[in-house]
Amino acid sequence: MDVDPCTYNFSTSELERKLAAADRSGKLPKALILVHFAGQPCDLAGIAASARRYGITLIEDASHALGASYLNRPIGSCEYSDATVFSFFATKSIATGEGGMVLTNRERVARNVKLLRAHGIVHDTSALEPWRYEQVGLGFNYRMTDIQAALGASQLKKLDGFLARRRQLAARYCEGLIDLPLQLPYRDSISTPAWHLYPIMITGEARAARRRALYFALREHGIRSQVHYIPIHTQPYYRDLGFRAGDFPAAEYYYEGALSLPLFVDLAESDQDRVIEIVRATLIER
Ligand SMILES: Cc1ncc(COP(=O)(O)O)c(C=O)c1O
């Protein structure tokens, strides 16, 4: 799937076109996994309607979108999907070191996820033999440790504060950069992003060279930015599967000009002002 040039999420029209083509050739996928990129919710209603039409399971990867909402419902409600997954890796808005969470409203999915988490074993405490357990499948140990879970549970209590701060910082970036030759993160009136990242996309002439210059200008001042992400189809594993540069033009166009500016809860406004100053000086000068 290519991305939507404004939201950088799944493009609903592209999805519809691809599913129709897949249906014609008898190659419909069993499941779709969408990513709420940078914490901006996807067009869930549109994507879910397409998935339903073709009987395809829909999984939300909400690793960037903890605390985001769509049509007044939190991401994770699984109103439009069969399951939603979150990552609590160290770079995410709440962190447990490693590990994550699966949310679902489907009994069968919940049961299977629990089985996969712990060795494919079910415990049946209602039986006459209370010691009884049954190995119903082959599974591995995918458990998060209790200590990690306790850390996550205590961070979850602070999530609203984390989100408010991220929202504030995102608004300050928007205010400080709005007049530059940039595409700032997408906003709409039906969703609230989690602001996991603040990706800017440089527009106009020589975008790749200007992105590069900006990355190094920030780095010279001790400021670390990052590019999220190198399009996956250009990675060796996917090249070996037959994908080629040019296959997903919107993702490639985005990548050439993309840079994520520092955005984290402890970012001081004076430090953010320095970032804004350097972005302005670099992009206006060129
Ligand atoms: C969108 C997205 N999905 C999945 C992952 C993987 O998460 P984990 O490393 O916890 O499996 C990441 C991690 O960085 C991510 O950004």
Image: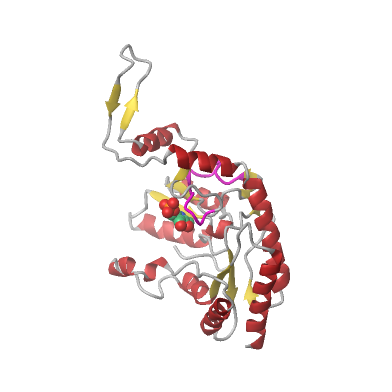
Task: Point out residue 140 in the picture as x, y percentages from the top left corner.
Answer: 30, 40
In the image, is residue 23 above or below residue 76?
below
Residue at 50% from the left image edge and 35% from the top image edge = 105
Task: Point out residue 106 in the picture as x, y percentages from the top left corner.
Answer: 46, 35
User: Quick check: is 85 in the magenta stretch?
Assistant: yes
Q: Foreground residue, 259 or 97?
A: 97
In the image: residue 107, left or right of residue 239: right
- Farthest residue in the bottom direction? 286
In the image: residue 136, left or right of residue 195: left
Task: Point out residue 113 in the picture as x, y percentages from the top left corner.
Answer: 39, 38
Residue at 60% from the left image edge and 48% from the top image edge = 67
Dividing the picture into quadrants, the one containing residue 206 is bottom right
Q: Is residue 215 visible?
A: yes
In the image: residue 94, left or right of residue 180: left
The colour mode here is: secondary structure
Name the main secondary structure of what is drawn in magenta: loop
Residue at 56% from the left image edge and 52% from the top image edge = 93
Dividing the picture into quadrants, the one containing residue 184 is bottom right
Q: Is residue 53 visible?
A: no
In the image, is residue 159 above or below residue 168?
above
Task: Point out residue 189 in the picture as x, y percentages from the top left corner.
Answer: 69, 55
Q: Foreground residue, 82 or 286?
A: 286
Dividing the picture into quadrants, the one containing residue 207 is bottom right
Magenta-colored span: 74-92
Report the number of numbered marks. 0
Q: Quadrant of ligand 1?
A: bottom left
Residue at 30% from the left image edge and 36% from the top image edge = 119
Q: In which quadrant of the rendered image does the N terminus lie? A: bottom left
